[in-house]
Image: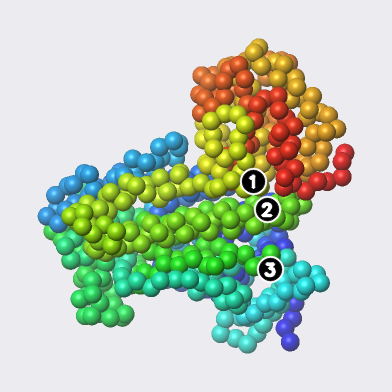
Amino acid sequence: MSSELGSTDVLIIGGGPVGLLTAYALQRMNISTCIVEPLDKNNMPMYGRACTLFPRTLEMLDQLELLDEFNQVGLIGRSNVNYDKNGQRVTNRGWQHLLSNMHGTFLDYFLNIRLKYSERLIQDAYEQNGGKVLVGWELREFSLDSKTAEVSAVVGAVGSKEVRTLRSKYIIGADGGRSKLRHLSGIPFIADNTTYRWVRIDGVVKTDMPDSRIGVASIESPTHGNVLWVPLDHCRTRIGFALSAEMYEKYGEHLTEAQAVEEAIASVAPFSLEFETVDWFTLYNIQQGVAENYIRDNCVILAGDACHTHSSGTAQGMNTGVHDAVNLAWKLGGILRGWYKKDVLQTYEEERRPIAQELIRQDKDFSTLISGDIPDQYKGTHLTPDALLAQVGKDYAQFVVGLGIHYEENMLNLDANAGTMIAGWRAPDVLVLAPGSRVPVRLQTITPNTGSFWVIVFTGEPLLTGTKLRALRSYLDSSESFTRKAHPDAVKFLTVIEGMKAQGEESLGVKSFGKVYYDPENSAHSKYGFTSGNGGIAVVRPDGIFAFATMLDKGNEIGNYFLRFIEVIAQL
């Protein structure tokens, strides 16, 4: 018989970055959460794991008000260098194509920060927002009450027979590739085990390799594949290499630290390498797979490695996990707040599972090439694995850095009736000016992720669009307006006026639509495809995805868009 630990809105199994970030985003929406984590990570030896975050992930962290702290700790990279087997620079290979595709964002860099520090930063923010982590506890079993639609989870103290019961409305499995929640839920996981084994080792090193701290480097080793060199936080460096079949036969699964150091030194030849300290190392077999479902019984949800596994070749593990967490949290939080219909939750699986499938398709190419082999579809091209890696990296670069990831049309992403943006793609970040200021601010900065949609009214030149602005204001003030039916926190407004004006509402001729900002050079309007004479209305999701757009005087179309999925409250 177990005693009660109480209840929470959302119980999260796993206190890694995905579980912590999901919980943190929910707490920001005033949703109660509790995380169950078996490991006492504060008292664990140093661990490395995920370490590189790409621009789209950084944007998401920024809109959750976490990025400043990450930037204080991590190493910021904007450059790379690639060396051939003789130690000569080869500028058209390596990871250069990733860097050249970090455009269209003000966060045009990648951040190298080890997982232990990422987790600590998110957990601190989570606990400051009232979150709770049960350290040293693990999920034993759970059940669903069909009458109350509640989840009852039995958690046990690690290494003990002591158990407790936690009740929740939803349970999320962010507990890694061997997810206990996924197993207990009976969700199939279709995976392929490869024969590739990779080593990652972190430490303080000395080397004669030029430019060893500029962001990322690669070495085309004839014996260890395409070797990864990543300068990290706290003056550390990560070296990653493939363990060949011959090496695996020599070492087996029980590679020692001394052996890992020996092979790391060999992998970076002809450069010298000396380890002053070793913080962490690992040998792992690459597995590639996706869970058959991300959601079961409308209340059991998987995220991160619990629903997809792949190599670390392009650092997609944590990046993809962050995208999962951000996509899920606002939808689940909005449902629990009574803002959105429950059907919205299904779009989490609809959007994120195809992304994981595409990631694994790409990862099969990357992991094969990094290991020094040629994928079947490229055999006969007479290119080396290193040359092919550069070509594949160029083809997949926008996806890898996250800026090209997009979703298909669904209840949230509706074909636009104005402008040039495509629904389901990242909304452009643009510079605008606050009243009185000549210091630009980013649109993403003034539209933080709090789970609310943003309706951005691009007014054009008010002298030309005055009639349309009055029509929009008339609709929003009428009893027919969707704003009378939606929860007031579900949708927020912002006005962007072309040019610079002395006073916002005076220039508009009507009450402004949320706070006013200015677009002095018409660059923000142009980015969204709106003209001076017409303006337009853009809808941006909480996660920064462009959702819909229409003409300035078609407020009713904005209403029709939202009425597809918002919960209608009692009309005011």
Q: Which residue in the protein does label 2 denote? A: 344
Amino acid, disc 2: Val
Residue 147 location (% of width, % of height): 81, 72
> Going by the image, does 344 lie left or right of 69?
right
Q: Are marks 1 and 2 in contact (CB under 8 Å)?
A: yes
Crowd band around label 1 with a 10 angstrom C-alpha radius: few (<14), some (14–19), many (20+): many
Amino acid, disc 3: Asp
Amino acid, disc 1: Leu
Location of the C terminus (image quadrant)? top right
Q: Which residue in the protein does label 3 denote? A: 297
Choose top left, top right, bottom left or bottom right for residue 255.
Answer: bottom left
Task: Give the answer, above or below, for where 96 lies relative to 416.
Answer: below
Residue ID at (75%, 43%): 563
Location of the N terminus (image quadrant)? bottom right
Which mark is first along the chain, 3 or 2? 3
Farthest top residue?
A: 463
Crowd band around label 2 with a 10 angstrom C-alpha radius: few (<14), some (14–19), many (20+): some
Residue 133 in view (yes/no): no
Task: Give the answer, above or below, for where 480 lies relative to 396.
Answer: above
Q: Which residue in the protein does label 1 denote? A: 412
Q: Secondary structure at mark 2?
A: helix
Residue 278 location (% of width, % of height): 31, 67
Spatial separation of the CA atoms under disc 2 and disc 3: 14 Å
Q: Are marks 2 and 3 in contact (CB under 8 Å)?
A: no
